[in-house]
Amino acid sequence: MVTTIEISGYIEDLLEALVRAGLYSSKTEAIREAVRRLVESYDLKDLSLRAFKNGGISFQLAVDISGISMDELIWFFLSHDTPPQLGADSDEEVNEGVKALRDKGLVVLDLSSLYVMLELNLFSYLPKLNKRFVVPDKVQERAQALLLRFSKMRGLIVVMDGVEVMRVNKSLAEFSRKNGISLQESHAIYLAKKMNGVLLSDDKRTRQVAKVHGVPAAPSVSLLVLGRDVGVLDEQTFKSLLGRLGSIPL
């Protein structure tokens, strides 16, 4: 996305002087350098925390702003007594999610649900659920850092087995801005709506935005319950995964 900035008066004269002096090849280059230095002067983690506490953005957008990984920002938020608003609010929401997952043959993942799947190592169970699991290409791009971290942690290459990557050719920057969510979240919601699927997300704001726009959404715990109900997970495995889910700082 291209941003247009109008500059005039003293600032424009100064930029032209810098170019004439040979310090920059163009005013555009000078502006880019100024913006880069401005951004580097900020504590982006603190900015993301302030924006999130104001109630205007999702946690996943806060991750994008912060420049660090999802798990790192979770701990940063918790160290500042700010829950990241991830997971499920109630049994009712979990049950609604189970119903949505039963009714739909396609499940779209976002970064938050991918994070949970990686933490619980759930990918091996996906083919047994007889669902089609997909992620938008934007989500897949953002997930690379998580995949690399888990690969290093486990000493083997971790991949998203059973998950298709789908390209979204749709401009959703304005939708993201209006709803206070990241571009990858917007792509996940759009894909779920376009393909008549359900969004699997552990970000509460993302699920709220999805539902407002007519897209059914479920937290990851609903997928575990569904797995138990259809016999993919036995009771012991279900309780073990549920316990591990509870230990994830969501």
Image (spheres, rainbow, N blue to C red):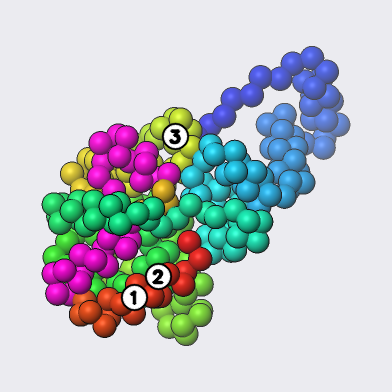
Left or right of 222? Residue 13 is right
* Residue 245, label in figure: 2
Q: Amino acid at mark 2?
A: Leu
How far across and down, in percent of the image, does residue 186 sit? Answer: 38, 41
- C-alpha separation, residue under disc 1 versus residue under disc 3: 32 Å
The kind of secondary structure element at disc 1 is helix
Secondary structure under badge 3?
helix
Residue drawn at (27%, 60%) of the image:
222
Residue underneath mark 1:
241
Q: Which mark is residue 101?
A: none
Gap in angstroms between the C-alphas marked 3 and 2: 28 Å
Identify the residue at the far bottom of this view.
155
According to the picture, the residue beneath numbered tag 3 turns out to be 179
| Residue range of the region highlighted in magenta in the rendering | 205-232
Magenta region, main secondary structure:
helix
Asked whether disc 3 touches disc 2, contact meaning CB atoms under 8 Å apart, the reply is no
Q: Please check the rendered image and state whether residue 20 is part of the magenta-colored stretch, yes or no.
A: no
Residue type (three-letter) at the residue carrying disc 3: Asn
Query: How much space separates mark 2 and mark 1, taking CA atoms?
Result: 6 Å
Given the image, on which type of amino acid does mark 1 rest? Leu
- Image position of 122 with respect to 205: above or below: below
Please rate how many residues cluster around mark 3, counting C-alpha atoms within 10 Å: few if below 14, some from 14 to 19, many from 20. Answer: some
Cβ–Cβ under 8 Å for marks 2 and 1? yes
Residue 41 position within the rendered picture, expressed as x and y whole percent measured from the top left: 77, 46
**Horizontally, is 218 left or right of 113 in the view?**
left
Answer with mark 1 or mark 3, whichever residue precedes in sequence: 3
- Of tags 1 and 3, the one toward the viewer is 1
Q: Position of residue 179 (x, y in %)?
A: 44, 34
Residue under the image location 20 percent in, 72 percent down = 228
Could you tell me if residue 68 is visible in this image? no
Left/right of residue 187 with respect to residue 65 in the rendered view: left
